[in-house]
Image: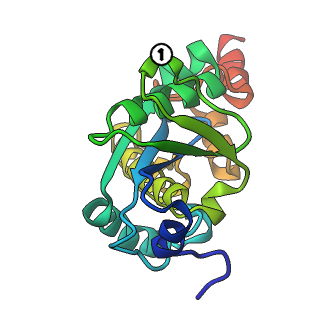
Amino acid sequence: MRRGRITSQRMGQRTGNRRLAGVDEAGRGPLAGPVVAAAVILNPRRPIVGLADSKALTPEERDTLAPLIRTRAIAWSVAWADREEIDSLNILGATFLAMRRALMRLPVCPTHIQVDGNQLPCISDLRMGCKIEAVIAGDASVAAISAASILAKTVRDAMMARLDSCYPGFGFAIHKGYATPSHIEALSAREPSPVHRRSFSPVRSAFAVLED
């Protein structure tokens, strides 16, 4: 078993009968596309072997685990904030918006929420009646957060593949909107697409060149 992987059975032993919702996001760093968040309440009676931080898994491993998470979890939800919301709120605000949406869409109310990282979205107005806490590197240590990271990543990757067919020439299906050399080169050669984040420096620079 690869280092860093955990099972939902181990997490079930830690949380007892609590309905722990793990929350994570994908897509804070890219220059284009939405930021996607997922919330997952795992079932300790239906363990999933191989859960890990989505970044530590291959695409094939993520694609194998994602349907297992959907079928074995007690509840799961995926939501996102689009490019306009990212540019309006800033990326952190948009990430929290996506997380709030994912939590609100859970069909089962959690009794505890753990979010990957060191910052938290406000949920006081959601009336969920449970505690929320940040867990640094939670996507590698908390099974429910690992599951959320996998769902968020696979959903966002699929979205970027679809956007690649809508806006060809940028390579979205390959780099998923991240600032790779090929993506930066494409931005220097053509006008940014409608899904490029105007508030991100490389995209602003591309628009500035066009205006000159």
Q: Position of residue 33 (x, y in %)?
A: 49, 35
Identity of the residue drawn at 72% across and 11% down: 212
Which residue is the site of mark 1? Answer: 125
- Against 170, is 3 above or below? below
Q: Quick check: can you spot residue 161? A: yes
Picture quadrant of residue 95: top right
Disc 1 is placed on an element classified as helix
In which quadrant will I find the N terminus?
bottom right
Q: Position of residue 69 (x, y in %)?
A: 35, 64
| Closer to us: 53 or 19 | 19
Circle 1 Cα neighbour tier, 10 Å, few/some/many (<14 / 14–19 / ≥20): few
Q: Position of residue 45 (x, y in %)?
A: 34, 72
Determine whether, in the image, residue 109 is placed left or right of residue 195.
Answer: left
Q: Residue furthest front?
A: 17
Identity of the residue drawn at 47% across and 40% down: 36
Q: Position of residue 103 (x, y in %)?
A: 41, 35
Q: Quick check: can you spot residue 185? A: no
| Closer to us: 154 or 118 | 118
Type of amino acid under label 1: Asp
- Against 13, is 134 above or below? above
